[in-house]
Amino acid sequence: MFEAAELGRKISREDFDAMAPGLRTELLALQQQLREADFPVVVLFAGVDGAGKNETVNLLNEWMDPRWIVTRAYGPSSDEERERPEYWRYWRDLPPKGKVGLFMSSWYHHPLIDRVTDKISGPELDERLERIVHFEKTLADEGALILKFWMHLSQKAQKKRLKSLEKDELTAWQVTKQDWQHWEMYDKFVAAAERMIMHTSKGHAPWQIVEGADPRYRSAVVLQTLKEAITKHFAARDAVKKVNAEIKGKKSDQPGALASQPSILSSLDMTQDIEGAEYNQALQEQRARLAHLYHAAKEKGVSTALVFEGWDAAGKGGTIRRLTNALNARDYQVIPIAAPTEEERAQHYLWRFWRHIARAGRVTVFDRSWYGRVLVERVEGFCTEEAWRRAYGEIVDFEKQLTDHGIVMCKFWLHITAEEQLARFNARGEIEYKKWKLTDEDWRNREQWGAYEQAVNDMVERTSTTDAPWTLVEANSKNFARVKVMRTVADALEAALGKPGKKKKD
């Protein structure tokens, strides 16, 4: 695979200097056009030590406007990062739409090193590479342009390059003992890299192997590839928008048809209730139990993520308040999810949820969540049908990363009947301190009851998994709902604490 990158190709200084002004002008123009685009550009640099990754990244920042470039390089994970799923730090650093992100020692680094040092087997490497494929496809499906450059040197050329760097006082610091150790394992690196590139070079995120011996040649290849890729991506995005507009124009909404379909919600016994002294006793028991289990989870570094979805006026807020009453305010955070902000709209829809994943031992409560993509965005037409259908798999993958890390996840749909909702709406309008809760949007959403019910049915059917199941809560009785939610969370913590915690590798 790498033989074509060991041919000793060069570009003369005269040829490079003649090409540079025009290419630089074109890149700057594209960057200005990109600022108004609906996609980010993600550029990864990996390869042989000394093959020019740092120099190329520096050149890109020099030639283009660095204000619209995000540059990230990764070392060993910090304590803060180890307490979260592996991909948390990469999601955190993704460039927003309109910017270019340059990544070194990124999500490919640890799998490659672990394979070369025999910490993992070939099949284990493939499993981790498949995680990368899913990650990159999730970004690409939302519009991101992904480019990956493997900067290559032959073993002989690498030795020459490292010695040259060591001789210069200004660059000697770049060469470490680890670089020479890697050089001695050159054949193992090449074999692992070949397997990695073959597994992860996809149409949505291709690898480009760049011969790195001549700095002008490698610079020309990277710069020209970047220019052509951005230009083509603009054209591809325009074509996608045109097709989506045509599909949307031909499609007719049929909420009535959806309303006639039976759903999982219709099977719930909505008469269940608990009152008076029995309720107070049950609430106190579950609160005490939850407090004990939450403290035990904190000591073991076990985090909890709670997701609350449900109809307007179903009692999510009141249930959350009773639940958090059992916790220490220092250790939990309630995240209310509304329409995305300007900053959030500039990112992948999952980005704003990744950023709220808590450190070990904390509790995060999402008052509405990432399921907005397959609920409100689906029903109201805020995203394409292709996007919300694709989201089921993206969400299951997201939640699996959390639960694989050892996070306890509980997801609740608080269900009330249409008649109960109407009664609560009317009651809100008569109580001064609750009037603010009732909006025109609540009444409008009520008209789409059938469409939402079918969306909920599909959501539960496609995203309720063993490690992240949905709990459907019969919430016509607020008392019954609160006790059921607290008992479910306590049961989940109890089950998790009975199992050995999963440790994440650095």
Image (cartoon, grey):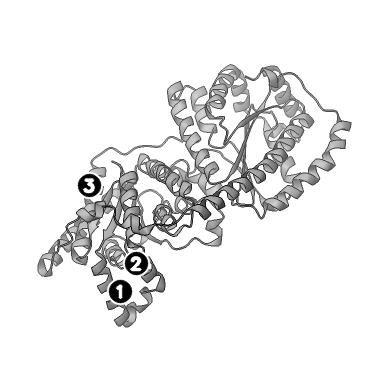
Classify mark 1: helix, strand or loop. Answer: helix
Q: Is residue 256 above or below residue 143?
A: below
Residue 431 percent location from the top left of the image: 30, 81
**Closer to the observer: label 3 or label 1?**
1
Please give the name of the residue rendered at 28% of the width and 66% of the height, measured from the top-left corner: 315
Q: Position of residue 172 (x, y in %)?
A: 72, 32
Q: How many marks?
A: 3
Answer above or below: position of 373 versus 127: below
Foreground disc of the pair 2, 1:
2
Which label number is shown at residue 425? 1
Q: Residues within 10 Å of mark 2 (few under 14, many from 20)?
A: some
Camera-side residue of 191 and 174:
191
Q: In what element is the residue under mark 2? A: helix
Residue sitting nearer the eye, 373 or 292: 373
The relative height of residue 137 versus residue 493 in the rendered view (above or below) is above
Q: Are marks 2 and 1 in contact (CB under 8 Å)?
A: yes
Q: Quadrant of residue 436?
A: bottom left
Q: Classify residue 88 as left or right of residue 283.
A: right
**Which residue, given by chain and number where applicable, does mark 2 sit on?**
446
Q: Earlier in the sequence, mark 3 or mark 1?
A: 1
Looking at the picture, which amino acid does disc 1 mark?
Phe
Q: Amino acid at mark 3?
A: Glu
Residue at 76 percent of width and 20 percent of height: 8
* Distance CA(mark 3)–CA(mark 1): 37 Å
- Residue at image position (26%, 66%) is 418
Residue 494, label in figure: 3
Disc 3 to disc 2, C-alpha distance = 38 Å
The disc, 2 or 1, on the residue closer to the chain's N-terminal end is 1
